[in-house]
Image (cartoon, grey):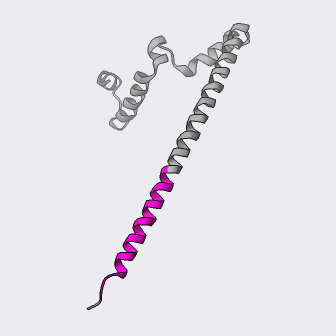
Amino acid sequence: MYEIVRATRVPPEMINAIIKVEKLRADDIFFNETGLEEEDVEPSLISLGIDKTEEYKALIKEYETRSKEFLESKKDETAEMMQRVQSLNEKREAAFKAQMEVNKGSRNTVKAE
């Protein structure tokens, strides 16, 4: 990381930006395995005509199917989670109201001297 900064004579204000980019690259599995940027793949597929092949179309269709199934499973999971959160909120609200009633009742029992 520091070698990049030293080798290119980067202004100090750009160092943080370079660190963020390099961290993204380090976290990017596709880049780590292939050495290619993800954004460069699609233009290459189009220029080589690969996007018109049946094999490519089958891969895209399979990906769409898997993505749809994944999102559907997450939708159910999210609905269950939201229902649990709503239930917890209702219980908290009921407990809060009960505590307010207890506090209200204890104020009324204070005797004036």
On screen, residue 1 versus residue 64, left or right, reads: left
Nearer to us in this view, 35 or 66: 66
Is the residue 51 above or below the residue 93 in the image? above
Tell me the quarter of the image containing the C terminus: bottom left
The chief SS type of the magenta part is helix
Is the residue 32 above or below the residue 92 in the image? above
Nearer to us in this view, 70 or 15: 70
On screen, residue 7 versus residue 72, left or right, reads: left
Q: Which residue is pictured at 39% across the width and 27% down the height?
A: 23
Magenta part of the chain: 88-111
Tell me the quarter of the image containing the N terminus: top left
Q: Tell whether position 72 is magenta.
A: no
On screen, residue 9 versus residue 35, left or right, reads: left
Q: Tell whether position 109 is magenta.
A: yes
Q: Position of residue 30 (x, y in %)?
A: 49, 17
Is the residue 96 above or below the residue 49 in the image? below
Q: Where on the picture, by quarter, is residue 110?
A: bottom left
Q: Position of residue 69 (x, y in %)?
A: 64, 25
Taking the view exactly as shown, the residue that stands out farthest to the left is 113
Taking the view exactly as shown, the residue that stands out farthest to the bottom is 113
Q: Where on the picture, by quarter, is residue 3?
A: top left
Q: Position of residue 9 (x, y in %)?
A: 33, 27
Number of numbered discs visible in the structure rendering: 0
Q: Which residue is pictured at 74% across the width and 11% down the height?
A: 52
Q: Which residue is pictured at 52% across the width and 50% down the height?
A: 87
Q: Position of residue 36 (x, y in %)?
A: 50, 15
